[in-house]
């Protein structure tokens, strides 16, 4: 159901108090006006500075007085149909006189064709008003909305673009507010007098700025390739088979959108690298979620941020949503130590994971599987759970090859990869990368290139995590051996697999 249809239904059902959290004030007011006009309802718009606007008889009424602004509702005839838009009214909801007046109006308006609509950039409803307030989300511009705006601007400049280029520009704009879209397209026109295919870079930069300002998601550059991953052959095969799963051809075939992947295992074994490589290989934007940023100090703020994260992710779809160290984020989800905030955020998140139909592919990484809530591991949340462990000897040789091909592509043959793989048992990909850096420091300090001997010497000075955290790793191995996860590596005689670096 579209916003307009749902809003019209709320009006006809006489929901007295409607709360719309959105930063797109102008666009939502336009949508409300269209619905009100269809139902022959008057629209009264109020803000704290100017009072009511648009109606000459009431111009300025309630200026700097939110309680007086609510009194206008009672001054209108009982049978008069009207929608009252109150901008930034969330700032006054904690005031006892405002809260009491809203409760009184909620009773009164059950029998009158009038509705109060609170517009706010964030969701913040006091507990004592939660029962009388109905929250309706306002979505970011859809593909068709953006295409209409772009077509309008193209017509104004007298230029045309290929339909494929128009669709690419529209997709790059998804996830931005209409105001930002207009601004970045106006910038493109001001730069070279027209909208060009190359303006996608401008749009992506605007998108990075927008996402960064949410302070919830990061627009992460993904340059790593599947070939940068050493080992993990089972995992790579699984990913390669799903490379075209977001295409229209896959929809026509009857394939659903891939849901996501949980990568559990030892630190430094390439889980984060895999998330980046997936986005690069599938040509999808990569969003990184720091779950800690979802939690705010104000009542309702955490839930609001969670909804904002979901809305933004779906607006950018198809995309990859990378959740790093999800085990730390939701370790206390079942406790009530924070008045149940963690539990509510977690509940919202896993419900979305199970019910989402948008092509948002979730890649979650976890080091300590024991702290994860059982609900997260249930089938239906992720398409697959892979266990990523320490690399076998063959995989270590491949990891050394990946790194040295990047560091010394012209002298790769001078390094004894077999010896390096043999001399580094129990080393993770991240630890292999660190020993190479140490070997390079040795060679650089002596004004020469580093050698195999330097790498072996560096390895002898590093105590791998497999020895310092032996008990934890044994628990992970036992969990994987019990069939709780699919092995990321094909190593026949090992439970553990590996990757180039973290």
Image: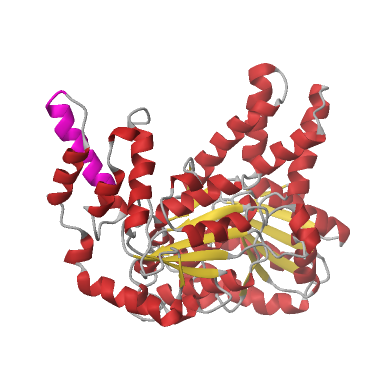
Residue 56 point in image, percent of width and height: 76, 46
Q: Residue furthest top?
A: 192
Residue drawn at the location 59% of the way across and 52% of the way down: 319
Q: Is residue 458 left or right of residue 247?
A: left
Instruction: Classify residue 447 by image quadrant.
Output: top left
Q: Is residue 498 left or right of residue 281?
A: left
Magenta span: 432-447
Residue 106 point in image, percent of width and height: 65, 75
Instruction: Classify residue 154 by image quadrant.
Output: top right
Q: Nearer the viewer, residue 239 or 83?
A: 239
Q: Is residue 32 left or right of residue 222?
A: right
In the rendered image, the quadrant that contains the N terminus is: bottom right
Q: Nearer the viewer, residue 228 or 125?
A: 228
Q: Nearer the viewer, residue 134 or 249?
A: 249
Q: Is residue 143 left or right of residue 411?
A: right
Can residue 216 be seen in this snapshot?
no
Residue 33 point in image, percent of width and height: 78, 53
Residue drawn at the location 69% of the way across and 23% of the way down: 189
């Amino acid at each position: 159901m579209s916003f307009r249809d749902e809003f019209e239904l709320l009006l006809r059902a006489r929901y007295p108090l409607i709360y719309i959290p959105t930063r797109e004030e102008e666009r939502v007011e336009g949508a409300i006006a269209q619905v009100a006009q269809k139902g022959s309802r008057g629209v009264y718009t109020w803000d704290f500075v100017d009072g009511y606007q648009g109606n000459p008889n009431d111009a300025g009424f309630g200026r700097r007085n939110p309680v007086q602004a609510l009194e206008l509702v009672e001054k209108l005839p009982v049978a008069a149909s009207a929608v009252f838009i109150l901008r930034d009214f969330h700032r006054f909801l904690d005031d006892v006189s405002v809260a009491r007046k809203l409760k009184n109006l909620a009773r009164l308006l059950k029998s009158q064709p009038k509705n109060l609509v609170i517009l706010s950039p964030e969701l913040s409803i006091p507990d004592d008003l939660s029962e009388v307030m109905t929250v309706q989300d306002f979505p970011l511009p859809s593909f068709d909305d953006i295409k209409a705006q772009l077509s309008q601007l193209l017509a104004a400049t007298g230029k045309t673009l290929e339909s494929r280029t128009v669709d690419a520009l529209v997709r790059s704009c998804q996830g931005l507010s209409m105001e930002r879209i207009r601004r970045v397209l106006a910038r493109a026109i001001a730069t070279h007098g027209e909208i060009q295919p190359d303006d996608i870079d401008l749009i992506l930069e605007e998108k990075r700025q927008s996402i960064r300002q949410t302070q919830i998601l990061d627009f992460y550059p993904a340059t790593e390739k599947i070939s940068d991953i050493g080992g993990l052959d089972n995992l790579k095969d699984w990913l390669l088979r799903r490379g075209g799963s977001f295409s229209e051809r896959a929809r026509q075939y009857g394939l659903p959108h891939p849901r996501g992947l949980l990568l559990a295992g030892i630190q430094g074994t390439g889980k984060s690298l895999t998330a980046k490589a997936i986005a690069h290989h599938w040509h999808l934007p990569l969003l990184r979620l720091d779950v800690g940023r979802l939690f705010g100090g104000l009542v309702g703020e955490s839930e609001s941020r969670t909804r904002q994260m979901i809305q933004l992710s779906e607006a950018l779809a198809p995309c990859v949503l990378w959740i790093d160290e999800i085990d730390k984020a939701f370790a206390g989800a079942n406790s009530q130590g924070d008045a149940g905030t963690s539990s509510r955020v977690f509940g919202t998140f896993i419900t979305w994971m199970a019910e989402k139909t948008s092509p948002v592919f979730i890649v979650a990484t976890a080091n300590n599987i024991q702290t994860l809530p059982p609900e997260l591991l249930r089938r239906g949340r992720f398409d697959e759970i892979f266990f990523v462990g320490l690399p076998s000897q063959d995989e270590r040789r491949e990891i050394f090859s990946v790194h040295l091909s990047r560091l010394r592509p012209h002298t790769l043959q001078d390094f004894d990869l077999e010896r390096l793989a043999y001399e580094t048992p129990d080393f993770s990909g991240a630890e292999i990368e660190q020993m190479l850096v140490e070997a390079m420091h040795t060679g650089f300090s002596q004004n020469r290139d580093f050698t195999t001997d330097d790498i072996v010497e560096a390895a002898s000075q590093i105590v791998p995590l497999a020895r310092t955290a032996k008990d934890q790793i044994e628990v992970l191995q036992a969990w994987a051996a019990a069939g709780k996860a699919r092995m990321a590596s094909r190593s026949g005689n090992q439970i553990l697999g590996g990757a180039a670096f973290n």
